[in-house]
Amino acid sequence: MPTSDRYDVVVVGARCAGASTALLLARRGLRVLVLERARRGADTLSTHALMRGGAAQLRRWGVLERIAAAGTPPVRQVRFHYPGESATVSIRPAAGVDALYAPRRTLLDTALADAAVAAGAEIRYGVTVTDLVYDSEGRVSGVRGRDRSGAAVHAEAWLTVGADGVRSLVARRAGARTERIGAHRGAVVYGYWSGLDATGYEWFYRPGGAAGFIPTNDGEVCVFAGTSSERFAREVAGDVRAGYHRLLAEVAGGARGRLGAAQPPRRLRAFPGRPGFLRRAWGPGWALVGDAGYFLDPLSTHGMTDALRDAQLLAEAVGAVLCGTPEAAALSQFQARRDRLSGPTFAVVDQLAGYQWDTPAVRRLLFALSSAMTDEVEALSPIRSDT
């Protein structure tokens, strides 16, 4: 890439946060470059369940149709299992959607990236960003890195967006401070089962552990088991497969027959846990979206929905700048809206991640989480459909 290449926006990361940010900004007519170190269509660590807010955004952006057409099963009910009792909640039409979806990341990230390219964005895979570039006044003015051949990459932009995950280089180099950090961290192990009878999301809660069934593409079900990071280190990390099955037997014992009739995963993926956090979301010439700026414990199953939400909020802020709002005011509003929507969810999920609750307490926490998600959907619904 010639060093003279200049863009309106450079996005670091082409996963769901970065690709959706690129999509929305390109639709506003901006020249957008996305740099992604992985290959196109690569998988990533994710249990990938979308909540209503995420499904509604994909529908408004014209991407949900592709997700459904690829065979992602619609989820029309959610079952909650507690010791000795279960409850089923039907997904009723609201915010333009009548079902939830849990597309594999190989599908979702690619669908969003393809939509971004169709809108005019440029995406380059196999590029590792190694540093930020600054102008004479200390403002971030782009990035530098290398592609897989070792060739130097240098791109300048008015705005550099970090969508590069919890270990975000953009956040680190820009000095984005952590403004809030959780007190707890949970661990999760998951894999894909074949032939498992699961027609909707199913969540299992028992003191000390949790599990979930998430129907996804190709007739598979993502099955996760979670516990505190401390217990994971003691009882699971030494033999992840055995620990995973012990947790499932403990927490989802009522589904033992269904699990026994299904084919277990050949491969398991484990996340040992890290505390949730909120980082400062912007500064001169830079902004953060997705896990780069805001991370929740995976027990929330809300990470992808948050990523799409933050992309939408940032696109709205950039649109305000294009209409004459001072940059600092618009980006301050972006962070304020993100924090206002994230605060209640963050507090609830941090308590869930501690795994110190009993059944009445976890039911109260889940009710509070549902209320926060409903508020989020309502807050986002007035935003223009192209942002």
Image (cartoon, helix red, strand yellow):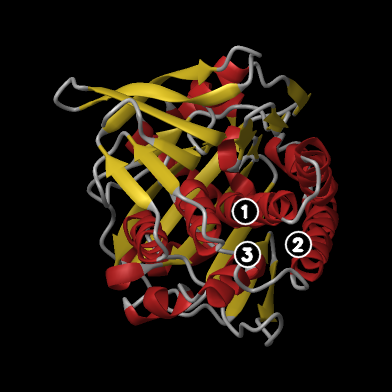
Could you tell me which residue is drawn at 52 percent across and 64 percent down?
Answer: 27
| Label 3 – label 2 distance at C-alpha | 19 Å
Q: What amino acid type should be assigned to the residue bearing mark 3?
A: Thr
| Label 3 – label 1 distance at C-alpha | 20 Å
| Label 1 – label 2 distance at C-alpha | 9 Å
Residue 333 appears at what percent x and percent y? 82, 45
Could you tell me which residue is drawn at 64 percent across and 57 percent down?
Answer: 312
Confirm or deny contact between disc 3 and disc 1 (CB under 8 A): no
Q: What amino acid type should be assigned to the residue bearing mark 2?
A: Met
Residue 119 appears at what percent x and percent y? 42, 64
Q: Residue furthest front?
A: 4
Give the mark nearest the N terminus, 1 or 2. 1
Q: Secondary structure at mark 1?
A: loop
Give the mark nearest the N terminus, 3 or 1. 1
Q: Which residue is mark 2?
A: 373
Q: What amino acid type should be assigned to the residue bearing mark 1?
A: His
Could you tell me which residue is drawn at 61 percent across and 85 percent down?
Answer: 98
Q: Where does the C terminus fall, quadrant-wise?
A: bottom right
The image quadrant of residue 196 is bottom left
Q: Which residue is mark 1?
A: 302
Give the mark nearest the N terminus, 3 or 2. 2
Q: Nearer the viewer, mark 3 or mark 1?
A: 3
Confirm or deny contact between disc 1 and disc 2 (CB under 8 A): yes
- Res 12 visible: no
Horizontal relation, residue 234 to residue 242: left or right:
right
- Dot 1, how many residues are within 10 Å of its Cα: few (below 14), some (14-19), or many (20+)? many
Q: Secondary structure at mark 3?
A: loop
